[in-house]
Image: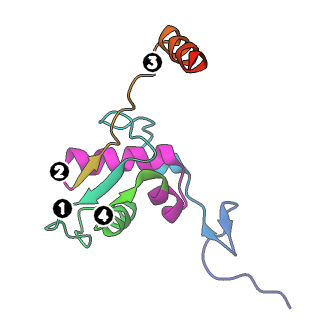
Amino acid sequence: MLTEPPGPQHEWLDDAAGPVVRPYTLTGGRVRSAADGFDLVAFVLAGPEVDAADPRLSPEHRRLVDLAHRPVPVAELAAELDLAVGVVRVLLGDLLARGLVAVHEPPAAAPLPDDDILKAVVSGLRAL
């Protein structure tokens, strides 16, 4: 005799993975953060006084704060939470707006030298 488990059954409920939550529900339908886009290699660091157990934070926000008590890149946060980078960027924007984390962008790459300068250097080296 086959018995159904108690409680409502939904097509979005997966026995192996549990309930499936769409990424847009985690961000409230937002696809862009309040802050500018974060570079994948930007380091995120939570302030020392920030409590990851703050009940005003969503579970995803709490996990981000918990992971960011040491400098961690945005890409690693996305991998650790198993979320799309876009979702993590929106959640980080929320935390940044509340002053709970700091984002340290990598230094901008120096502009490449002009092609004419490179050709002159190569010509000079050949002349030696």
**Marks 4 and 1 close (CB-CB < 8 Å):** no
Q: Secondary structure at mark 2?
A: loop
Q: Crowding at label 2, few (<14), some or many (≥20) Cα neighbours within 10 Å?
A: few
- Which residue is the site of mark 1? 47
Q: Picture quarter containing residue 58?
A: bottom left
Which residue lies under the disc numbered 3?
A: 113
Q: Which residues are magenta?
A: 76-100
Q: Which mark is residue 100?
A: none
Disc on the earlier residue, 2 or 1: 1
- Give me the C-alpha separation between circle 3 and circle 2: 39 Å
Mark 3 or 2, nearer chain start: 2
Front in this rendered view, residue 43 or 118: 118
- Graded by Cα atoms within 10 Å as few (under 14), some (14 to 19) or many (20 or more), the crowding at tag 3 reads few
- Mark 3 or mark 2: which is in front? 3
Q: Is residue 5 left or right of residue 52?
A: right
Q: Name which residue type carries label 3.
A: Pro
How far apart are the alpha carbons under marks 1 and 3?
A: 39 Å
Quadrant of residue 68 within the rendered picture: bottom left
Are circles 2 and 1 on residues that touch, CB within 8 Å? yes
Across and down, in percent, residue 14 comes to 68, 69
Q: Amino acid at mark 4?
A: Val
Q: Earlier in the sequence, mark 1 or mark 3?
A: 1
In the displayed image of the protein, which residue is found farthest to the bottom? 1
Q: Are marks 3 and 2 in contact (CB under 8 Å)?
A: no
How would you classify the magenta stretch by its main secondary structure? helix
Answer with left or right where residue 64 lies relative to residue 51.
right
Compare marks 2 and 4 and give the one earlier in the sequence: 4
Q: Position of residue 56 (x, y in %)?
A: 23, 62
Mark 2 sits on what residue? 99
- Image quarter where the N terminus lies is bottom right
